[in-house]
């Protein structure tokens, strides 16, 4: 339990610092000072600050996965839940955007979600080997591009509208339902 608490304190410290300081200026020492921990404690859990982002994103993705039944829900429903998750985390999303961390976050998400095999349920037809390799990246990178445009447009569209845009884009190529 203490391990989880220390990791959460470190993560919270980094997220708060991202709202105040450019990511490139945030040091391990700064994170430790904000989290009220020693550098030794930091290095017990993480090697570099990017590992903290990785940890944070895994936690967010796992919370999302707990809310979805990927085999039973439609593509549209899943996309709306994804965009609702982004909508619920606008300040953090904006901090990631302002600190040029969207590409890093997208890369982490692709790697993690691919390892969970979550895309098998939304790929139409029998999955060929290349589906497992390329389609998860295609889906995540396109969602991240939609999110980038959404941020740049001031979060004007609702999660439902973003889900519709995504569904229309993927309807003829990868989505079923």
Image (cartoon, rainbow, N blue to C red):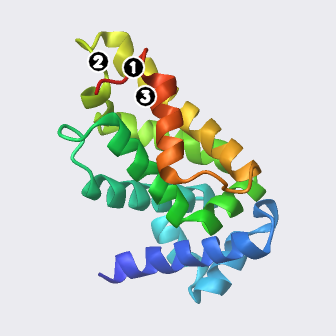
Rendered image quadrant of residue 12: bottom right
Mark 1 in CB contact with mark 2 (< 8 angstroms): yes
Q: Locate the N terminus by quadrant.
A: bottom left
In the depicted view, which residue is nearer to us: 86 or 100? 86
Residue 61 can be seen, yes or no: yes
Residue at x 45%, y 19% (from the top left corner): 134
Residue linked to disc 1: 174
Among numbered discs 2 and 3, the one appearing first in the sequence: 2
Label 3: state its secondary structure: helix
Residue linked to disc 2: 124
What's the CA distance linking mark 2 and mark 3? 13 Å
Return the mark for residue 136. Answer: 3
Image location (x, y in percent) of residue 153: 74, 50
Nearer mark to the viewer, of 3 and 1: 1
Image location (x, y in percent) of residue 55: 46, 60
Neighbourhood count class around disc 2 (C-alpha, 10 Å): few under 14, some 14–19, many 20 upward: some
Rendered image quadrant of residue 117: top left
In the depicted view, which residue is nearer to us: 80 or 30? 80
């Amino acid at each position: 339990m203490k391990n989880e608490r220390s990791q959460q304190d470190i993560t919270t410290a980094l997220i708060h610092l991202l709202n105040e300081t450019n990511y490139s200026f945030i040091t391990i020492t700064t994170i430790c000072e904000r989290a009220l921990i020693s550098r030794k404690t930091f290095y017990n859990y993480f090697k570099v600050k990017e590992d903290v982002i990785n940890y944070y994103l895994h936690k967010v993705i796992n919370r999302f996965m707990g809310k979805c039944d990927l085999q039973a829900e439609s593509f549209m429903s899943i996309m709306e839940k994804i965009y609702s998750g982004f909508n619920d985390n606008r300040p953090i999303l904006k901090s990631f955007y302002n600190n040029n961390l969207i590409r890093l976050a997208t890369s982490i998400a692709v790697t993690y979600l691919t390892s969970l095999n979550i895309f098998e349920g939304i790929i139409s037809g029998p999955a060929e080997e290349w589906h497992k390799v390329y389609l998860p990246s295609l889906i995540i990178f396109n969602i991240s591009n939609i999110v980038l445009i959404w941020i740049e447009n001031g979060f004007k569209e609702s999660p439902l509208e973003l889900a519709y845009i995504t569904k229309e884009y993927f309807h003829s190529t990868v989505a079923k339902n």
